């Protein structure tokens, strides 16, 4: 709500709707209605995951309202790349909110491949120590303390506050890993310890960067595969990318007031 785009005298609610048909951020104060610019970051690990959306931007950006700015950041695969890219980007560009869009693996086999979720809380599920055949995370071995900022307990939690919209999608728990899970033992360990629905390689880094920079955020994941013993032939990456990008295009076109 920081960059004021226009300021007009406060009118009736009906008139305000006519003046503000495109979901521009507004707020009323001192008998004036304030219209704000909105800078949105859309980030993904790879170009492939976000290509249809960047094509949509190339085709439609010229018809976006002046107050709306959408930027894309391909941050790289994994938490190290994501943390560095996001940290640098957020400090310099200061978006009003950020969306991470990616594919992911589902622990829950009843969810359809290609279906979408929003991640409400993220756990760092392979950062820690092995104690014989036991995995202990950094909270278990007391190198981190529960609720040290920006954690809530041992999770990186999205409160979904400060967003101009919240998609109608299931909110689930995610784990982020450096090593994609592909053995019965690892999958059982993660399910017992974190009860996750979705696994990715970047989610926690995105939550950490946005919580630390105090940027409202949304992590969208489209299920490309089940978390199971590795069988790439069962993965449905093109389907997951398609549904993910349809959702992104819907979100941005509705914020832009564009009818497709
Ligand atoms: O070839 C492989 O074994 C392989 C394993 C995991 C991911 C890939 C990719 O090409 C995609 C990496 C990308 O996708 C996300 N992703 C998708 N499914 C999962 C998963 O089951 N567990 C963790 N991450 C997943 C991840 O966030 C990466 O950005 C290839």
Image: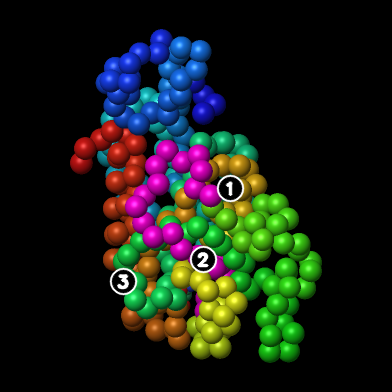
Instruction: Answer yes or no: is residue 233 visible.
Output: yes
Identify the mark nearer the N-term, 1 or 3. Answer: 3
Q: Nearer the viewer, residue 161 or 233?
A: 161
Q: Which residues are magenta?
A: 159-181
Q: Is 1 colored magenta in this rendering?
A: no
Identify the mark nearer the N-term, 3 or 2. Answer: 3
Position of the C terminus by quadrant: top left
The image position of residue 157, as x and y in percent, is 57, 56
Q: Residue at x 37, y 70 (%)?
A: 224
Which mark is in front, 2 or 1? 2
Rendering colour mode: rainbow
Identify the mark nearer the N-term, 2 or 1. Answer: 2
The disc label shown at residue 112, or none: 3
In the rendered image, the vertical position of residue 226 relative to residue 115, given as above or below: below
Q: Quadrant of residue 83?
A: bottom right
Q: Cβ–Cβ below 8 Å for labels 2 and 1?
A: no
| Mark 2 Cα-neighbour bin, 10 Å: few <14, some 14–19, many ≥20 | many
The image position of residue 211, as x and y in percent, is 61, 48
Q: Residue at x 56, y 62 (%)?
A: 122
Secondary structure type for disc 2: strand
The image position of residue 259, as x and y in percent, is 21, 37
Image-based side of 79 in relation to 62, left or right: right
Secondary structure type for disc 3: loop
Question: Is the stretch drawn in magenta largely helix, strand or loop?
Answer: loop
What distance separates the C-alpha of mark 3 from that of mark 2? 17 Å
Q: Nearer the viewer, residue 127 or 47?
A: 127
| Mark 3 Cα-neighbour bin, 10 Å: few <14, some 14–19, many ≥20 | some
Q: Residue at x 39, y 42 (%)?
A: 165
What distance separates the C-alpha of mark 1 from that of mark 3? 29 Å
Q: Which residue is mark 1?
A: 210
């Amino acid at each position: 709500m920081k960059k004021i785009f226009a300021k007009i005298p406060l009118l009736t609610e009906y008139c305000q709707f006519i003046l503000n048909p495109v979901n521009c951020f507004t707020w009323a104060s001192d008998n004036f209605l304030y219209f704000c610019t909105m800078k949105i970051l859309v980030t993904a690990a790879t170009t492939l995951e976000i290509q249809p959306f960047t094509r949509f931007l190339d085709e439609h950006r010229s018809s976006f309202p002046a107050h709306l700015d959408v930027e894309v950041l391909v941050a790289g695969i994994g938490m190290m790349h994501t943390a560095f890219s996001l940290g640098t980007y957020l400090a310099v560009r200061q978006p009003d909110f950020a969306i991470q869009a990616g594919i992911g693996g589902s622990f829950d086999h009843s969810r359809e491949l290609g279906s979408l979720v929003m991640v409400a809380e993220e756990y760092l599920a392979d950062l820690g120590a092995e104690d014989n055949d036991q995995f202990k995370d950094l909270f278990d071995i007391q190198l981190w303390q529960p609720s040290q900022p920006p954690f809530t307990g041992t999770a990186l939690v999205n409160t979904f506050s400060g967003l101009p919209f919240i998609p109608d999608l299931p909110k689930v728990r995610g784990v982020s890993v450096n090593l994609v899970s592909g053995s019965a033992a690892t999958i059982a360990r993660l399910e017992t310890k974190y009860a996750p629905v979705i696994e990715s390689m970047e989610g926690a880094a995105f939550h950490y960067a946005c919580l630390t920079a105090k940027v409202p955020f949304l992590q969208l994941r489209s299920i490309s595969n089940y978390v199971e013993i590795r069988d790439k032939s069962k993965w449905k990456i093109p389907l997951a990318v398609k549904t993910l990008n349809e959702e992104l295009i819907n979100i941005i076109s509705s914020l832009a007031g564009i009818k497709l």
